[in-house]
Image: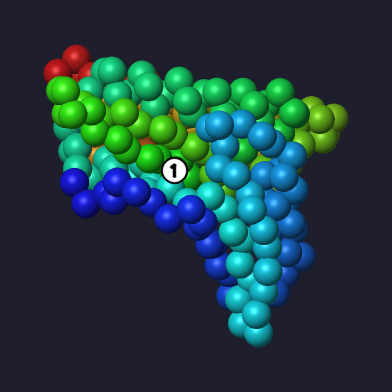
Amino acid sequence: MLIPQSPPILRPKSSKKKTITTLEAIWSIQNEIRVMKSLDHPNVVKFIDVFQDQDLVFLVMERVQADLFQYLQYYPGGVGLATAQSIAYQVLAAIQALHDTCISHRDIKPENILINVAVRSSNKEHNIEAKLADFGSCEPVILAEDSKTSSIRVGTVGWLAPEVFNPQNPINNGLSLDIWSFGIVLMELLLGSTHFNEVWLAGFDGLVIHDLPGLLRATQGGLAR
């Protein structure tokens, strides 16, 4: 694998100032800093500092080796049950830490799950440490429950819950959306990127809205194999 075994200590995340032109963009950066500062959990990426130069704003966080999307490219058929269980447990722990503070993430996907990989010399199995990241889309759940709706649709197609696409209903931005997105990540861990891309993403736009049971049956066929 091309993942380094000893990552640097710090990980800068930069944003071009010329792209931060709306209140939503400013709020997203401030929100990400606020959420990371409020959490101290081994499965949540740690915030170190923020600084800027003439062109960029930098968020400095602890460094990890890769994100889960990159890792999954080495396993087009899935990572195996034991590895999937380990990663899922850690991601769920991070989600629970967020939910315990009445915050919903709203954009859970492999690119926002960072990992460190250590290979056990005895059996060459991977010992994986997973950390949830990218909190710019987070929203206080108390506000969501008070209003029952959100005027902003955020997240990534493929990991969004079906109710987000229903034009008949307002957007529900509560905790259940995070659980749906986590379930899709778990499915991707078990099925692998090939099945996920060719079956789930290929049918997502139409089937998740109009024939969700049919899409789930196709996915269950992949799990059975």
The reply to whether residue 209 is visible in this rendering is no
Residue at the outermost right position? 146
Q: How is the image coloured?
A: rainbow
Q: In the displayed structure, would residue 15 be above or below residue 70?
A: below
Residue under the image location 71 percent in, 23 percent down? 100
User: Which residue is nearer to you in this view: 168 or 15?
Assistant: 15
Q: Quadrant of residue 175?
A: top right
Q: Quadrant of residue 27?
A: bottom right
User: Which residue is nearer to you in this view: 152 or 28?
Assistant: 28
Position in image of residue 35 (x %, y %): 71, 43
* Left or right of residue 90: residue 29: right
Amino acid tagged 1:
Leu
Residue that carries the numbered disc 1 in the rendered image: 114
* Left or right of residue 130: residue 72: left
* Left or right of residue 32: residue 195: left
Which quadrant is home to the C terminus? top left
Residue under the image location 67 percent in, 51 percent down? 32
Q: Quadrant of residue 102?
A: top right
Position in image of residue 162 (x %, y %): 51, 32
Mark 1 surroundings: few (<14), some (14-19) or many (≥20) residues within 10 A:
many
Q: In the displayed structure, would residue 27 be above or below residue 51?
A: above
